[in-house]
Amino acid sequence: MTQTISINDSGRLQLTPLEIPSRLLLGPGPSNAHPTVLQAMNTSPVGHLDPAFLALMDEIQSLLRYVWQTENPLTIAVSGTGTAAMEATIANAVEPGDIVLIGVAGYFGNRLVDMAGRYGADVRSITKPWGQVFNLDELKTALETHRPAILALVHAETSTGARQPLEGVADLCREFGTLLLVDTVTSLGGVPLFLDAWGVDLAYSCSQKGLSCPPGASPLTMSARAVEKLQQRQSKVANWYLDMLLLGKYWGAERTYHHTAPINLYYALREALRLLAEEGLANSWQRHQKNVEYLWEGLENLGLSMHVEQEYRLPTLTTVRIPAGVDGKAIARQLLNEHNIEIGGGLGELAGLVWRVGLMGFNSRKESVDQLLAALRQVLPK
């Protein structure tokens, strides 16, 4: 909503109180936060070294280990968005000259390539068409060819809506002494994920999707193998703010001051994780799958088709092909302006070709799907 700034007779600026429209956020993120989470954010802040806050940090770590299904001691929330957690994994795991192999089948695979190169990695990549996934034979051939220090894969590619299978990948990585790094930004909380059982060494996520929390406090975890590589670095981590050797002392037993944490965002994250644990991971995964199948059926009844084959579709984000002759941006604008519903457009190779519809966390409900389908019936050309 446009705000008008004026200067009154006394020379002071005048601005109307904040007014933000209420939207149903069904795009690639952020998603609507759970009301209980928003209420938690209204709690008065305490100091970032207050015993009560330190205890809350411990609870966040325990809850993150649960939702990620890992026992990794170094499991924290980075004070920043999911991109900060993404960069933290690269900054800590990569030393100049390390061979880093990255699976690129979408926009965020390309972002990993860019980040790794900025930290001095010898970046190698394997590619698939956007919306497809890598199989074990393809990954094994690439590992044999490049013998990387790190293999990075996007578990849930937010730009395409495809889910990369991870079972068996770590076994291949172990043959070559390779660490497995995984992007779980659009999967954590809504898609089955078993870091320890699957042998994942580094993973990162965000708070504003499957966790039903506002953005700004982003999960990161490192296995013992990844921590060992970090501790044996020959050079300092190039990013001071995201250096896990320093941050680990703030989140660990030392409680050494590092930065002023976003207190209220951590309140929100703690409540979001508590709600997820209360529901139960298996129940959350089942809910997301049930509701997205209801969405797919409704979209198909409208004559629309999905971009990713069903076996590899994410339950948290669906890419819907824009029919020929339809102005995708115009439809999205109508949904926003006339129905207060946000959906996303395509990125990169899929720009102008798909809509991205998210059903994540609190928004993964039958009511959300019904609201979207009713709006689409009105705005889609006959």
Image (cartoon, grey):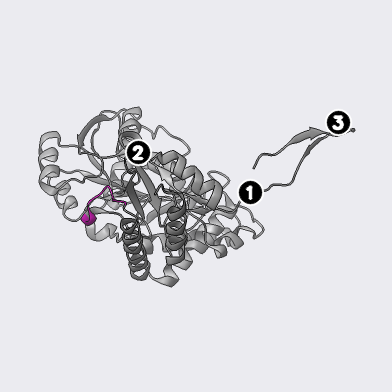
For residue 377, say whether it is visible.
Answer: yes
Residue 43 vertical placement versus 131 (above, below): below
Distance CA(mark 1)–CA(mark 2): 33 Å
Give the residue type that dot 2 points to.
Gly
**Residue 361 belongs to the span the image colors magenta:** no
Viewer-proximal residue among 71 and 245: 71
Give the residue type that dot 1 points to.
Ile
Give the mark nearer the N terminus: 1 vs 2. Answer: 1
Q: In the image, which is nearer the foreground, mark 3 or mark 1?
A: 1
Which quadrant of the figure has residue 364?
A: bottom left
For residue 61, say whether it is visible.
Answer: no
Q: Residue at x 47, y 66 (%)?
A: 274
**Quadrant (top left/top right/bottom left/bottom right) for the N terminus:** top right
Residue occupied by mark 3: 11
Residue 243 vertical placement versus 40 (above, below): above
Give the extent of the magenta segment. Answer: 304-311
Task: Say the numbered circle drawn on residue 20.
Answer: 1
Give the residue type that dot 3 points to.
Gly
